[in-house]
Amino acid sequence: FTVTTFGESHGPAIGCVIDGCPPGLAIDASEFAADLARRATGKSRHTSQRREEDAVEILSGVYQGLTTGTPIALLIRNTDARSKDYDAIAAQFRPGHADYTYHHKYGIRDPRGGGRSSARETTMRVAAGVIAKKWLAGKYGIAVHACVNQVGTLRAEMPAVIDWSVVEANPFFWPDAAQVPELEALLDATRKSGDSLGARVLTVATGVPVGWGQPIYGKLDAELGAAMLSINAVKGVEFGAGFAAVEQPGSRHRDLIGADGFHSNHAGGILGGISSGQDITCQVAFKPTSSLRLPGESLDADGKAVEVVTTGRHDPCVGLRAPPICEAMMALTLMDLALRHRAQCGDVPAQTPRVPAGRN
Ligand code: EPS
């Protein structure tokens, strides 16, 4: 099961090809709208003001409302692709952007609106993720949710059980409604100063059966980590306790197993690269947006020193729109591993963790 995307931020369209989806899944073009709207720009003053309809056209792979097993091609036409900074971007390497590396790798670069390296590309990941989410939910009862649990130094007060309706009720995917005014004030001050902030996104998959993932090559955490790290602006990924495991003694870190299942989930639902039947929990670090109104030292393509100021439409915190993207990458990875698991071991119905009698 593979997904590839194509298109540039200011080109005529963006799209994706999803190859290997099983036949017979009901899909209608209207089903993409909800998740695409959750990711879209222009939803609040705290995001880029670019206005895109993000209307999906299904070009292939679906007949009479059902997937046919052949490659599914989805297309979204760009309608608000204009920018003030084509010339500046073409001539200079914006600090923190991919301009420098694309230029040196390819010797040619489409600078329009960031071209391929723009966050616009993530739109198609979300569209593809809609198909994976639907397949996983229908076949296994799996749900995938994500929230923002840190912006800059502001950490969310995490409830013992996340109420996803609270997360969806504010434009920041924030799990504690009481902190939203504080977050808004932080974002307003950041935007006014011309600077930007990073964010941490927590993604949770519930209902994943035991057994998905390959034990050595293609571990679930390796595949999921690669998927998350392929999202623009992602600089780090953790599973379960993540880097905090360094400070936990083994007696605290290990998840004890009783007849009623696991007593904790420091492993993030992954043991030996294979799903354990617990929630899969993954946290991703998004760097602060590189496009800043604050001048920064850089070079132009001739190697001359320049001072770069980014104009145009940008997000002061790109991580704020990332939860649907992280959900999509989690769902796409799980679907791929589910299909691989089925090919080798057959279908395993959703189940609670199996604990061998008399052993733990
Ligand atoms: C982006 C720059 C802005 C954002 C864009 C990501 O686009 P523009 O150059 O057209 O003003 O709006 O994000 C999207 C269009 C999107 O759909 O996420 C960038 O430099 O990455």
Image (tube, rainbow, N blue to C red):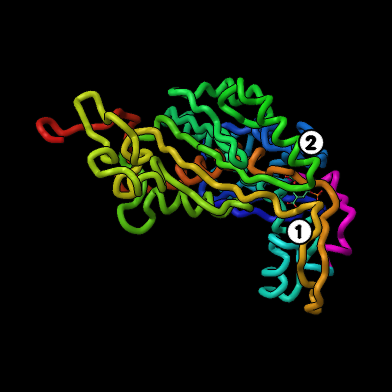
Which residue does the image show at 82% across and 42% down from the upper left? 50
Residue 127: which numbered mark, if any?
A: none
Q: Which residue is mark 1?
A: 115
Is residue 87 or residue 338 the one in the foreground? 87
Q: Amino acid at mark 1?
A: Gly
Mark 1 vs 2, N-terminal side: 2
Q: Which residue is mark 2?
A: 42
Is residue 289 or residue 3 the one in the foreground? 289
Asked if disc 1 is less than 8 Å from ligand 1, the answer is no
What percent of the width, then of the height, locates residue 179? 61, 25
Q: Residues within 10 Å of mark 1 (few under 14, many from 20)?
A: some
Q: Give the image quarter of residue 95.
A: bottom right
Which contiguous range is marked in magenta?
76-90
Q: Is residue 283 above or below residue 33?
A: below
Q: Amino acid at mark 2?
A: Gly
Which residue does the image show at 69% across and 29% down from the upper left? 171
Dot 2: what SS? loop
Q: Is residue 69 left or right of residue 290?
A: left
Q: Is residue 127 in sight in this rendering?
A: no
Was residue 85 drawn as part of the magenta stretch in this picture? Answer: yes
Dot 1: what SS? helix
Q: Is residue 15 above or below residue 31?
A: below
